[in-house]
Image: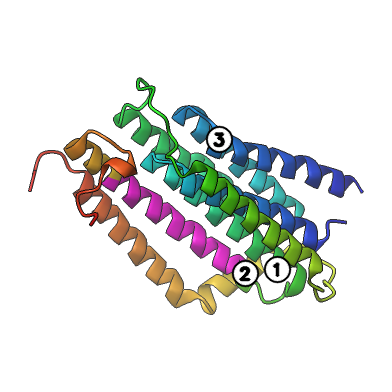
Amino acid sequence: MVELAMFIVVSAIAVIGAAGTVLSRSVVYASLFLLLSLLAVAGIYVLIFSPFLALVQVLIYGGAIIVVVLFALMLTRLGDTNESLDNRQKPLAAVTGLAAMGILIATVIANKWPASVDPSPASFRDLSSTLFSRWAIPFELASVLLLVALIGAIVMAKPGDQK
Amino acid sequence: MIKLEYVLVVSAILFCLGLYGVLARRNAIMILLSIELMLNAVNINLIAFAVYLSPEEMTGLIFAIFIITVAAAEIGLALAIVLRLFKSRATVNVDEVNLMKW
């Protein structure tokens, strides 16, 4: 019962943060709302027995991605302009989003989910042994992907060199 | 006891807010933030299914880890592209970058 109350609170924070991200009129506030939402999602991970993923979420999203986004906002100097952040298909976007939300929630409620087993936290040991045995090749490929993205980001953002 | 349905409903709400953001924003960085929201909603789904339906397999957890990796690579590269765009065009609004639009 306590778990359920905590889940409702954390989910409400996540949804408020997400709504702030997509509705806020300031880019800096939008990214800070996104940080709030991501940390609340880490709380959801803790409540559904995935502490490792919560740790990764806080480290990667809270620590890395938001900082990179704030740096990009600083470098593109968007704070001193007053132009709208939304385009003119906003009403259509709202209709599409609400329709998709209705369909998804109706599907979730209407579907008969298989009886869930009693959830228990996955141990770090099991998770890491699975990652490094069965998923070893994708793991190595992910490191190559990160290297390629790093080199690509440096090449794209390099100053001068106007082609 | 948190039921699987509750987690899926929260994830659906987050996903659709992200979808609205992608469609309604014209600032490229705001679109990227909305994409991050959508990826997060997908991660919640994967982890919930992994924990509630097949806890001994852990495939969903591994997938979520890989999605976080790919999201980090994606946002780094995309922000580099946005910076280059800002240098050459002095704007990051996607509706003003229409050189290749027919």
Helix, strand or loop at mark 2: helix
Helix, strand or loop at mark 3: helix
Residue A117: give x, y in percent of width and height.
Answer: 83, 72
Measured in 3D between alpha carbons, the distance from the residue under mark 3 to the one under mark 1, in whole angstroms, is 30 Å
Locate the C terminus of chain B and report the quarter of the image it occupies: bottom left
Residue B91: give x, y in percent of width and height.
Answer: 27, 35
Question: Residue placed at 55% from the left, 35% from the top?
Answer: A23
Q: Nearer the viewer, mark 3 or mark 2?
A: 3
Q: Which mark is residue A90?
A: none
* Marks 2 and 1, the one that precedes in the sequence: 1
Question: Residue placed at 45% from the left, 37% from the top?
Answer: A86
Disc 2: which residue:
B60
Q: Can residue A51 be seen at all in this image of the molecule?
A: no
Residue A41: give x, y in percent of width and height.
Answer: 65, 47
Disc 1: which residue:
B49
Whether residues under marks 2 and 1 lie with C-beta atoms below 8 angstroms apart, the answer is yes
Q: Which region is colored magenta? A: B60-81
> Which of these two is toward me, B59 or B49?
B49
Measured in 3D between alpha carbons, the distance from the residue under mark 3 to the one under mark 2, in whole angstroms, is 31 Å
Is residue B44 within the magenta segment?
Answer: no
Q: Amino acid at mark 1?
A: Phe
Question: Which secondary structure class fits the magenta region best?
Answer: helix
Q: Which mark is residue A23?
A: 3
